[in-house]
Amino acid sequence: MNKMILGRYIPGDSPIHRLDPRTKLLVTFYYIAIVFLANNWQSYLFVGVVTLAIIPLAQVSWRFFIRGLMPILFLIIFTVLLQVFFTTGGHVYWHWGWLTISSLGLTNAVFIFLRLVLIIFMSTLLTLTTPSLSLADAVESLLKPLRTVHFPVTEVALMLSIALRFVPTLMDQTTKTMNAQRARGVDFGSGGLIKQVKSIVPLFIPLFVSAFSMADDLATAMEARGYNDGNHRTRYRVLRYGRGDVMAAGVMAVLTAGLVLLRK
Amino acid sequence: MDITFDHVSYTYQAGTPMAGIGLDDVSLRIRGGDYTAIIGHTGSGKSTLLQHLNALLKPSAGTVTIGDRVITSDTSNKNLKPLRQKVGMVFQFAESQLFESSVERDVAFGPQNFGVPAAEALALAKKSVAQVGLPETVLAKSPFDLSGGQMRRVAIAGVLAMQPEILVLDEPTAGLDPAGRRDMMQLFAKLHADGQTIVLVTHQMDDVADYADRVLVMDQGKLVKSGTPQDVFQDADWLTAHQLGLPHTASFALKLQARGFKFAHLPQTEGELIAALRTQLGGADHE
């Protein structure tokens, strides 16, 4: 459980941490889109250097970024191998049946690899420097225009914050229940498939029971404090763009310009 | 069966900025047959210590010896199951571990996991449910139809049915009403009288004074004191400094002391207090 990078916020007070969460969210999405502009060595080098220059600003150890890669390592390797063996074109180095290693295949593989790694680094940067509740605030703020078409923005944002808020609680509960059942002789993650599926039951039923009772308690607590669907609620955490956000936008503009100029 | 800790340390989330000390160089011995209480304020490492007793956690450094099994940081996670049977653990709010369709099946779940045949496990379930003072009629009920206190008893029965050599209890009376608490503590006292080794984590100093043979005091992951309740509860100032209190009897005696009564040792239980007061009040013997 500890290795889950998603929602793994590392507290800090770096320039990246201080950015408005809306900026970070938008910039991350924008970055993911424009990485696809890169299509030659020069442009990849450029976007790579810019990214590697941004990351240290967060003052978070590189280890966390590398660890962020681990969950999808398999996907990366798989994609790279597909590219290596199935792209044809350029000089052919090796050939066997329908498998070919060609110069174009190798270049493409390297590009895809770089693209995936860069995208993951950037999204890891977002999750490492932004508390999940701030992200929910950002989503709410960005969805506001949808109110005009009667989309329940506040409710959706509340659901999102509650869901995020309960992730650690449920994980905690999972660990506790697993320990309690282990103490009663359950072996999680051993034995055949049937046995493993069976060992899930003593874990899931208590989890569901406690999740429902927590939801019930939360609803009562919210009603007791006068919560209503609230279209005109004021906020405790007010989001405000600052100088850093302008600079972030500037960096993205430079990145875009550079990529457009350098790409073939 | 004894449990021995030899210079045991445990670090949470080692290697990250969130790393925290759970246990810091703890050496202790829990003797078979004893009723050992572990006290300490919240976050002092009690629960971490408990999870080492049946190898749910393995020490980062040092060795834990449970019976004849030695657990170090290198011990493999395989074959720990026999330990889990020997050291039965009742967690805080144990009622949240119930999941079966009937009380009987839930209580029989533990023994069945340890290879007890179904019929025998059901017999054990019946016996344990009676032991925790529940009527036989609950056996067929769904555990979710019971009251909170009854569910707690069912969960405890579920651990008793495993016939553990050592029974570990993590704040078993938290959230129970006074009558429920008293009944439960008497149940454990009875089990202990029948030869059951008991380890109890509690915030109730009265329970420690009334029932425990030995007390271990934890603070900031360290074992800061161990001894009999009489030893540990002598020094009120030291206890306050460690965010702990005295049993009611002892603090009452302390107030009497301020008014001129004299006690060679602070009495811990009502019986001791009465005996000490009787001589000093010098009243006529009413017996």
Image: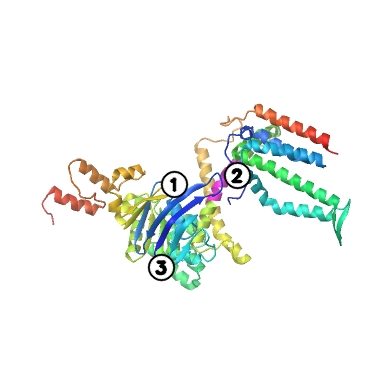
Q: Is residue B53 above or below residue A252?
A: below
Neighbor class of circle 3 (other Cα within 10 Å; few <14, some 14-19, many 20+) is some
Q: Position of residue A198 (x, y in %)?
A: 58, 63
Residue stretch in magenta = A159-172
Which amino acid lies under the numbered mark 2 shown in the image of this protein? Arg
- From this viewpoint, is residue B139 visible? yes
Q: Is residue B128 covered in magenta?
A: no
- From this viewpoint, is residue B138 visible? no
- Disc 1 on helix, strand or loop? loop
Q: Quadrant of residue A191?
A: bottom right
Identify the image quadrant of the C terminus of chain A: top right
- Disc 3 on helix, strand or loop? helix
Which amino acid lies under the numbered mark 1 shown in the image of this protein? Gly
Q: Quadrant of residue A7?
A: top right
Q: Which residue is mark 3?
A: B127
Q: Which residue is mark 1?
A: B43
**Marks 1,3: beta carbons within 8 A:** no
Q: In the image, is A48 to the left or to the right of A99?
A: left
Q: Position of residue A37 (x, y in %)?
A: 80, 39
Q: Which residue is mark 2?
A: A8
The extreme top residue here reads A243
Q: Is residue B32 above or below residue B20?
A: below
